[in-house]
Amino acid sequence: MSAADKFLSSFRDALKSNRGISKADRDALDRELNWAVEREAPPTIAIIGETGVGKTTTLNSLFNAGAEVGHSRATTKKADSFEASIFDHSGNKGKVRVLDLPGLGESIAKSEAILEIYKNSLPMADVILWVHPAADRMLEFSQRQLSLLFGGPLQHMANSVVFGLNKADDIYPTNWRRHANIPSDEQLANLADAEQNFRSLVQPVLPSETHRVITYSALQRYNLSSLFALLMEAMPPNRRWVLERRMDLADFLEKADQRFVQGLRPQSVGSVDQIGSPIVPSRSEILAQMTSADKQECFERGVSAEDWWRMRGNDGR
Ligand SMILES: Nc1nc2c(ncn2[C@@H]2O[C@H](COP(=O)(O)OP(=O)(O)OP(=O)(O)O)[C@@H](O)[C@H]2O)c(=O)[nH]1
Ligand SMILES: [Mg+2]
């Protein structure tokens, strides 16, 4: 449940039990509250990137727990005319308005027309997700276009950009740890380097310092919670709650080897262990309590789900 929903639910509970207000007034307040929440415009994300960089996969992994959904308009590009497409992405938790924008490199000849499209449509967005392949270090073209865009007319929007370096699983030496569905140590080092390289190359052409560069894999669902956190940060503060309510991140564990997931350390499941500590819940119960980020951290640190549960002090010690 999002923070906004928790707040609304506590507010409603408090309202229900407030005997100082008549039932009719309480009902009216409740209706007005619902109305205000529903009336708030959906979050609007501009997503920029070349064809095939993973824009659609990213949307599905952030808002549909990885399930594919159809769009109201499927194509972003017609024969040889480039245009922005606006559609409502029907996420599992509600609508997300998407401005799907052609990549700048898709037609060098048309790059001026594409820039014009950006200038006209980006101001409609709450947040801009600039998607680039993590393995691609050739950034001169992007640098030039970023400088034209954010050095000039859209300077005030530079702080709304998140740079998502997708396809982390494709980074050299492509030896992804498939059983745990996380990067190898070599890949982790190269991903950190890719982030650093990207940041140092785009920084000089942006009007303010950007910390919002993140490597992720939409397909393997790696680092989605960090990507989402950056999108939240880049949202206008008074609209963050609208985005958070739509969050439905795909679970990276679903793509891990299930024997590995089940078999990490099964010995203490559902039992009293030898030193008499209380019963540890079953692995599936613990997993249900963990966020995707918790699971990822456990895998990276080699900590079992049961140890995570104990470390959180859940066994009363
Ligand atoms: N290896 C890998 N492949 C990915 C990842 N994300 C997307 N892909 C693949 O890249 C291809 C293109 O993905 P899309 O999401 O359709 O890309 P897009 O940017 O929406 O493409 P257009 O709509 O044509 O502009 C598909 O085959 C995806 O499965 C990723 O993180 N890793
Ligand atoms: Mg697409």
Image (cartoon, grey):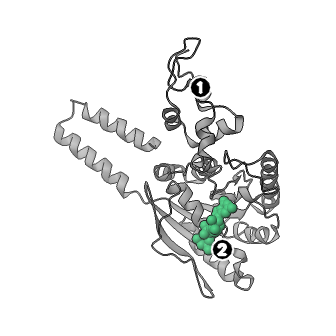
User: Looking at the image, which residue sits at the far top?
Assistant: 275
User: Looking at the image, which residue sits at the far bottom?
Assistant: 80
Q: Quadrant of ligand 1?
A: bottom right
Cα distance between the residues tagged 2 and 1: 48 Å
Quick one: quadrant of the N terminus?
top left
Residue at x-position 72% and y-position 50%: 211
Q: In which quarter of the view is residue 6 placed?
A: top left
Ligand 1 within 8 angstroms of badge 1 C-beta: no
Label 1: how many residues lie within 10 Å, few (<14), some (14-19) or many (20+)? Answer: few
Q: Nearer the viewer, mark 2 or mark 1?
A: 1
**As drawn, is 38 to the left or to the right of 42?**
left
* Residue 234 vertical position relative to residue 273 in the rendered view, above or below: below
Report the number of discs. 2
**As drawn, is 199 to the left or to the right of 72?**
right
Kind of residue indicated by mark 2: Thr
Q: Earlier in the sequence, mark 2 or mark 1?
A: 2
Residue at x-position 56% and y-position 17%: 273
User: Residue 79's x, y, as percent?
Assistant: 60, 88
Q: Residue 267 bears which disc, if any?
A: 1
**As drawn, is 269 to the left or to the right of 220?**
left
Mark 2 touches mark 1? (CB < 8 Å): no
Element type at mark 1: helix
Note whether residue 47 is visible.
no
Ligand 1 within 8 angstroms of badge 2 C-beta: yes
- From the image, tell me which residue sits under label 2: 51
* Residue 58 vertical position relative to residue 52 in the rendered view, above or below: above
User: Residue 183's x, y, as percent?
Assistant: 73, 48
Q: State the residue in front, 209 or 291.
A: 291
Quick one: quadrant of the C terminus?
top right
Residue at x-position 31% and y-position 32%: 14
Element type at mark 2: loop
